[in-house]
Image: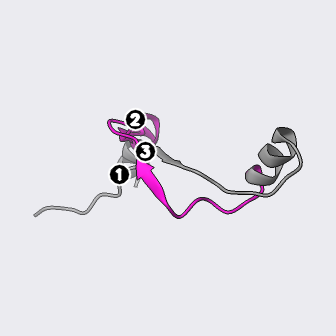
Amino acid sequence: MKKTYRVPCSWEVYGITVVEAESWDEAISTAEESPLPIDNSYIEDSFRIDEEMVEYEREKELKS
């Protein structure tokens, strides 16, 4: 019988945050504290399995 696995993974997205500021330094600081952009795009080939966390989960499963 097949089991269900939660596989740790990550990927990258690219977006633009629009902020009001008096300089680039202030704009960057403000952007770092802003919510993530809603309008974003997946960065092609950025999907990765977190091999370290998979190994951790495998070991945890073996101990139980």
Point out residue 46 in the picture as x, y percentages from the top left corner: 38, 37
Q: Earlier in the sequence, mark 3 or mark 2?
A: 3
- Inter-mark Cα distance, 1 to 3: 13 Å
Q: Which mark is residue 16?
A: none
| 8 with respect to 26 (left or right) | left
- Given the image, on which type of amino acid does mark 3 rest? Trp
Mark 2 nearby-residue class (10 Å; few <14, some 14–19, many ≥20): few
* Labelled pair 2, 1 in contact (Cβ < 8 Å): no
- Given the image, on which type of amino acid does mark 2 rest? Glu
Q: Which residue occupies 89% across, 49% down? A: 22
Mark 1 nearby-residue class (10 Å; few <14, some 14–19, many ≥20): few
Q: Nearer the viewer, residue 38 or 56?
A: 38
- Inter-mark Cα distance, 2 to 1: 9 Å
Instruction: Report the label total.
Output: 3
Secondary structure at badge 3 equals loop
- Inter-mark Cα distance, 3 to 2: 14 Å
- Residue to which mark 3 is pinned: 11
Question: Is residue 52 magenta-colored?
Answer: yes
Question: Is residue 8 magenta-colored?
Answer: no
Query: Which quadrant of the view contains residue 6?
Result: bottom left
Between disc 1 and disc 3, the foreground one is 3
Secondary structure at badge 2 equals helix
Point out residue 30 in the picture as x, y percentages from the top left corner: 81, 53
Magenta residues (range): 32-56
Secondary structure at badge 1 equals loop
Q: Earlier in the sequence, mark 2 or mark 1?
A: 1
Q: Which mark is residue 7?
A: 1
Image height of 52 relative to 13, above or below: above
Q: Which residue occupies 74% across, 57% down? A: 19
| 45 with respect to 40 (left or right) | left
- Residue to which mark 2 is pinned: 51
Q: Which residue occupies 68% across, 57% down? A: 18
